[in-house]
Image: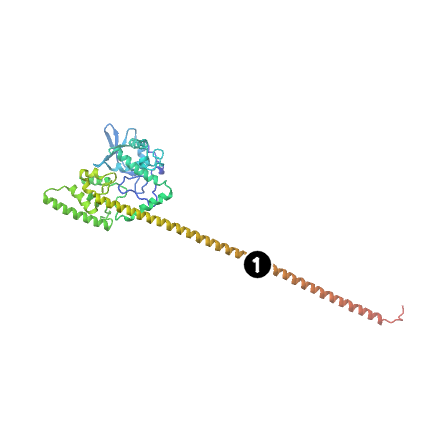
Amino acid sequence: MPRRKLSDRRIVQVPRDGEETNDDDLSGVGSSQVPETVENIEIDGGNGRSRKSRGRTALNDLYNLPTGERVKVSRNDVGQPIGAEAGVLGSYLGIVARNNAILPINYESWRQMPNSNKNQALELVKDKFSLEVSDDYVKHALGKKWRDNKIRFWSSTKGEDRERVGVASRQKQKFTHTVGSKSFARIANDEQITIGTSIGRIKLFNITHTKKDGSPITLKAAEIMEKLRGKKTEYEATASTNGSVNMEEIENQVIADVLGPERYGRVRCEGSFVTATKYFGANSSQYMPSQSQSSQAEVHRLKQQLSQFQAEVQAREAKRERKEAEILRREAEREVERERREAEILRREAEREAERERREAEIARREAEREAREAEREAAYQKLQQEFEEMMAMLRQNQPKNLPS
């Protein structure tokens, strides 16, 4: 069956400036770090039959799967999708989450989204994927991607507020990881396939915080790695003396000692949707903060939120004052410019009036000169006329009286 190429807008969406992808989330459409294709994946043909796709698999291929075939997505022991198929699943979840006809963005939160809509979206996913992960996991992942999509349609003020909080949070991070949008669960699974055995949380921390050249991503990450290594050696020596070594418990205790108690709702280096109760089981309380620590942490968190809110209010007030000052400055500039133009108009009007008077005076002067010349010519003419008449009179007097006629 020939491939049908989807339009780019269905599979690629560039994130806003300042928006970061979730550290441990599934690969999703819209991340510039996520390729449109992955290595060959496993296809479930139904009736217990499965096959590997040949070559690289594009998201477009999902729409061209023969009837009855679905992409098979495996899971790890804590219920997270793993393998190359997880990347395709994450990208497809992004497509479904942005389908406003199924998951409209007019609901205030994911909790308010009707179950009928969630189930419809889930069925769309199941049409293309044979899932070992739970329905709850898929719905949680859809909710995360739906919220990320919803923020793009919020009013600019809310969007700016969330972006400002995100920037402030990122500035407080001491270090980040080096795996991009690939989930920690997939990193751990790939490493297990490579070396043939599962890896612990400490090794996973080292892998995800090391550059390609083998050096730690930051000095802080290097310091953490050294502390983890030292604590682990110390606990292993103590456990060997006591004759009992449980590496998983040792690593859990080492991480708690070095990085502090786990936060509620997640476990370090285990990715999204893995809770302490699910991971640690009955022993979860020893790796979680005590009631007093939790209260202190909550007070500290609220104080930080209050400080951040006050800082934001001050920033907004300063921004408002700057805008008002800018408005006043521009108004003053416009007033000065208006007065300058009025003065220029008056100056030009005065110049035109002076020029008009000068021209009128020049005309009057020339008219006076013309009249003076006319008067001089008239006087000269009268004088000549008088002289002529006198001359004729003299000639008549001197003419002999007895000349023969």
| Residue 51 in view, yes or no | yes
Specify whether 316 is left or right of 376: left
Q: Nearer the viewer, residue 159 or 28?
A: 159
Q: Amino acid at mark 1?
A: Ala
**Residue occupied by mark 1:** 350
Q: Name the quarter where the C terminus is drawn.
A: bottom right
Q: Which residue is farthest top?
A: 47
Q: Nearer the viewer, residue 274 or 390?
A: 274
Count of numbered circles on the image: 1
Q: Name the quarter where the N terminus is drawn.
A: top left
Q: Residues within 10 Å of mark 1 (few under 14, many from 20)?
A: few
Give the color scheme: rainbow, by chain, secondary structure or one colour: rainbow
Specify whether 161 is left or right of 402: left
Say which quarter of the image contains residue 180: top left
Q: Position of residue 371 (x, y in %)?
A: 69, 63
- Relative to 362, residue 163 above or below: above
Q: Position of residue 137 (x, y in %)?
A: 26, 35
Q: Nearer the viewer, residue 207 or 58?
A: 207
Q: Position of residue 70 (x, y in %)?
A: 28, 31
Say which quarter of the image contains residue 190: top left
Seen at 16% across and 42% down, the residue is 249
